[in-house]
Image (cartoon, rainbow, N blue to C red):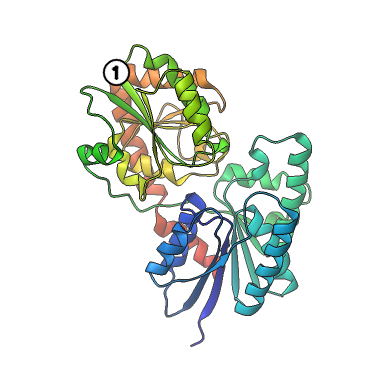
Amino acid sequence: MKKTKILYVITKGNFGGAQRYVFDLATGLPKEQYDVVVAIGTKDGDELKNRLEVVGIRTIPLSTLGRDVSVRKDTKSFWTLWQIIKSERPDILHLNSPKAAGLGTLIGRLLRIQNIIVTAHGWTWNEDRTFIQKILIKCVSLVTLMLAHTTITISQRECGQALAIPFAPKKKIVTISNGITPPQTLSRKDAEEQLGLPFVPMTVTIGAIGELHKNKGFEYLISGYYDLAQDRSTRLVIIGDGEERETLATLIKTLELSEKVFLVGARKEASQFLSAFDIYTLSSVKEGLPYVLLEAGSAGLPIISTDVGGIRELISDMEDGILIKPRNATEITSAITYLLEHSDKQKIFGKNIQQKIVRDFSVATMREKTYSLYK
């Protein structure tokens, strides 16, 4: 029996949320029925490529494909991707991230690919941009929505944003939430040692994991923590690396927090270090439905998160976590203070979110709903 060929395309090659999504989908398909190929932008690392090749999935590099706009590089990426799609002739083209989606939907239509699917991992117009830039991005997104046969949003909130665009093809837009397999964590002692954290008795560790990028809002988290650091037995640990590392390091030095705030760098399988944390924080100004919150909640950690993207569909404020406004250091301070003063709420929030994730956000459900679109 002829196998169904599916080509995934993704802009960045690191291992953030969108990359994990592609990995989970690509590795869950039965090999006797599907021929799976993944085309990956290589400017931001090769972690996704390496993980896929270990499990026997073929990858194709896209060396010029990147997140930032560049007419010269994007034109080259268009023709490179054209050649790849033309050569592979996939039955299904599944595109991830705005750049891959923008180029891929047009190429797919021109080459008459029968099933073009786009997953929106968070709309780009929710980022800090000028009004004109946001209008232009929405116009490009509308074209992408129209060219795709199906667009998957990972939260109802982002689905609503897409449907609010004039002339958006409502029947082509569906919502399928991200799902996870509960992470395996290290013992607390091993996690702290491998992160290089000094042993400090009776210290509450506030943690965060993410790429050091403007969208993650770490400057607000550090500033919000500042008022707590003066007289409380706490520390803040951020796992991740990226373009904002130097800026954040300068902020930490300026606030004289070098002995309280630790930028420990990126870690492979970062979720295994969640056991080093007592409270988990997410300070993003733009998200879809982040895997890291699913992982933190699955580990039973009480969560403080900005109310962006589809996070409200995961966290009910003051029932299984605390929701705060983005770009607001004062609310971060207040939320952390509340949990420090109410240890009973830490346990209740952690237990409630853990139960919700097991019930509603499994990787099996995500795969089942997505694979139904392939058929």
Work out whether residue 137 can be spotted: yes
Residue at horizontal 70 percent and vertical 58 percent from the top: 73
Residue 205 placement: quadrant: top left
Residue 192 point in image, percent of width and height: 26, 36
Residue 147's image quarter? Answer: bottom right
Q: Quadrant of the C terminus?
A: bottom right
Q: Residue at x 70, y 64 (%)?
A: 76
Identity of the residue furthest to the top in this view? 231
Q: Nearer the viewer, residue 180 or 270?
A: 270
Q: Residue at x 78, y 51 (%)?
A: 167
Give the vertical position of 118 relative to 130 (above or below): below
> Which amino acid type corresponds to the residue marked 1 in the rendered image?
Ser
**Residue beneath label 1, please?**
233
User: On the rendered structure, is 110 left or right of 191?
Assistant: right
Do we see residue 367 in this rendering? no
Q: Residue at x 79, y 38 (%)?
A: 132
Please, what secondary structure does the residue beneath circle 1 have? Answer: loop
